[in-house]
Image (cartoon, rainbow, N blue to C red):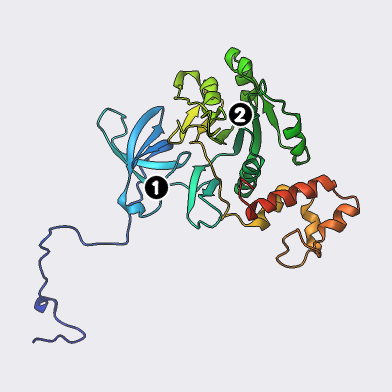
């Protein structure tokens, strides 16, 4: 066998041919400086619909992105055929940094995170006052997820013609969460849509809620030209039927904002949430944590927040609300 020294003559080295005829691998990736800027509107079985300069373009994720996925609300860089013509397919080559990421897990002991939407700045938690009955634990969990992701929560209560909203609103009064109460008549004549739209102007709002609460009905009232299928509540189980199977971003009339309709949820796991981040949503209580012991759960005998409230720096109801939200990490929605 012929051996080469440290400085072999290049003419003596035999280069093996590449039978596949492909280019050698490299860690250098193209910058795609000419890529179009797009917004992901929906994702369906590996195909992503993106809005690029007013055109809807179907695209797929480029292999170079690896496991990094794009979700509804993502800002992406797209190359290829950007005309949006039928049977054309572009490639998403880059996902831009996100300003926010709303996540959930299937359960509290499930480590797999599911990204619901990206780049939203408001979370509309839609709850029916009856048919189906409200689930305060699910509302609490959505609030925790919103605070953790840095989203402003908005409580939307539907079907007030079937039950009053006073008791539910009172339990969230200390949190200062803005709310809108609607009924069927207001939805029919457009009054409800106008009042909700005031809270959505200039924002990207994700709508979440239990199946059957009227979430998609609200979205249809807000964006009437893009009606989605709606369902009904099962009379035996009291549960709604999933009619929205994928998230969809829709522009409000006059380009005044965006709404993202998401599939109905029956659970909202918080395995991914660090309880220490929830306190950031309580600016009146956060300074009081300076005296807390390390890794304080804010619900123990040594917690400094009790003295902070006793000294008159914050309303006791606010501390109760914080501890109630933190406790949702330890219990399930049905408890």
Could you say where residue 128 lies in the image, as x and y percent from the top left?
A: 62, 30
Using the image as rendered, state which of residue 70 and residue 232 is in the foreground: 232
Residue neighbourhood size for the residue with mark 1, other residues' Cα within 10 Å, grouped as few (<14), some (14–19), many (≥20): many
How many circles with numbers are drawn on the protein?
A: 2
Residue at image coords 10%, 76% = 11
Label placed on residue 200: 2
User: With respect to residue 1, does 102 lie above or below?
Assistant: above
Using the image as rendered, state which of residue 280 and residue 243 is in the foreground: 243
The answer to whether residue 99 of the structure is visible from this angle is no
Residue neighbourhood size for the residue with mark 2, other residues' Cα within 10 Å, grouped as few (<14), some (14–19), many (≥20): some
Q: Which residue is mark 1?
A: 94
Using the image as rendered, state which of residue 37 and residue 58 is in the foreground: 58
Q: Quadrant of the N terminus?
A: bottom left
Closer to us: mark 2 or mark 1? Answer: 2
Q: Quadrant of residue 8?
A: bottom left
Could you say where residue 187 lies in the image, as x and y percent from the top left?
A: 59, 18
Could you say where residue 27 lies in the image, as x and y percent from the top left?
A: 32, 62
The residues tagged by marks 2 and 1 sit, at their Cα atoms, a distance apart of 28 Å
User: With respect to residue 234, does 117 lie above or below?
Assistant: below
| Residue lying farthest to the top in this orientation | 189
Left or right of 230, for residue 24: left
Left or right of 92, for residue 105: right
Could you say where residue 226 lies in the image, as x and y percent from the top left?
A: 45, 22
Residue at image coords 68%, 27% = 180
The answer to whether residue 26 of the structure is visible from this angle is yes
User: With respect to residue 278, does 166 lie above or below?
Assistant: above
Assign a secondary structure to mark 2. Answer: helix
Tell which circle, 2 or 1, labels the residue nearer the N-terminal end.
Answer: 1
Residue at image coords 69%, 53% = 327
Residue at image coords 12%, 59% = 20
């Amino acid at each position: 066998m012929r051996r080469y020294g440290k400085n072999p003559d290049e003419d003596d080295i035999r280069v093996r041919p590449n039978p596949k005829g492909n280019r050698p691998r490299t860690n250098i990736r193209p910058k795609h400086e000419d890529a179009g800027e797009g917004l992901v509107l929906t994702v369906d079985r590996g195909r992503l619909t993106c809005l690029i300069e007013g055109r809807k373009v179907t695209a797929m994720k480029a292999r170079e992105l690896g496991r990094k996925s794009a979700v509804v609300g993502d800002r992406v860089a797209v190359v290829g055929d950007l005309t949006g013509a039928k049977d054309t397919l572009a490639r998403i080559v880059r996902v831009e940094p996100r300003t926010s990421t709303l996540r959930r897990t299937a359960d509290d002991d499930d480590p797999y995170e599911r990204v619901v939407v990206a780049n939203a700045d408001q979370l509309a938690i839609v709850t029916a006052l009856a048919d189906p009955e409200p689930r305060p634990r699910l509302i609490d969990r959505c609030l925790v997820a919103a605070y953790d992701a840095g989203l402003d929560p908005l409580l939307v209560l539907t079907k007030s013609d079937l039950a009053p909203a006073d008791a539910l609103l009172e339990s969230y009064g200390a949190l200062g969460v803005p709310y809108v109460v609607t009924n069927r008549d207001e939805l029919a004549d457009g009054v409800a849509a106008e009042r909700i739209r005031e809270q959505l102007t200039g924002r990207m709002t994700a709508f979440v809620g239990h199946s059957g609460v009227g979430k998609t009905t609200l979205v249809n009232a807000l964006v009437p030209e893009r009606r989605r299928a709606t369902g009904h509540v099962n009379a035996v189980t009291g549960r709604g039927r999933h009619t929205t199977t994928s998230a969809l971003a829709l522009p409000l009339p006059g380009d005044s904002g965006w709404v993202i309709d998401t599939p109905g949820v029956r659970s909202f796991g918080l395995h991914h949430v660090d309880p220490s981040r929830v306190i950031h949503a309580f600016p009146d209580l956060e300074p009081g944590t300076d005296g807390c012991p390390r890794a304080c759960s804010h619900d123990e005998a040594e917690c400094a927040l009790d003295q902070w409230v006793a000294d008159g720096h914050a309303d006791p109801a606010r501390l109760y609300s914080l501890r109630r939200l933190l406790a949702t990490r330890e219990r399930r929605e049905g408890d």
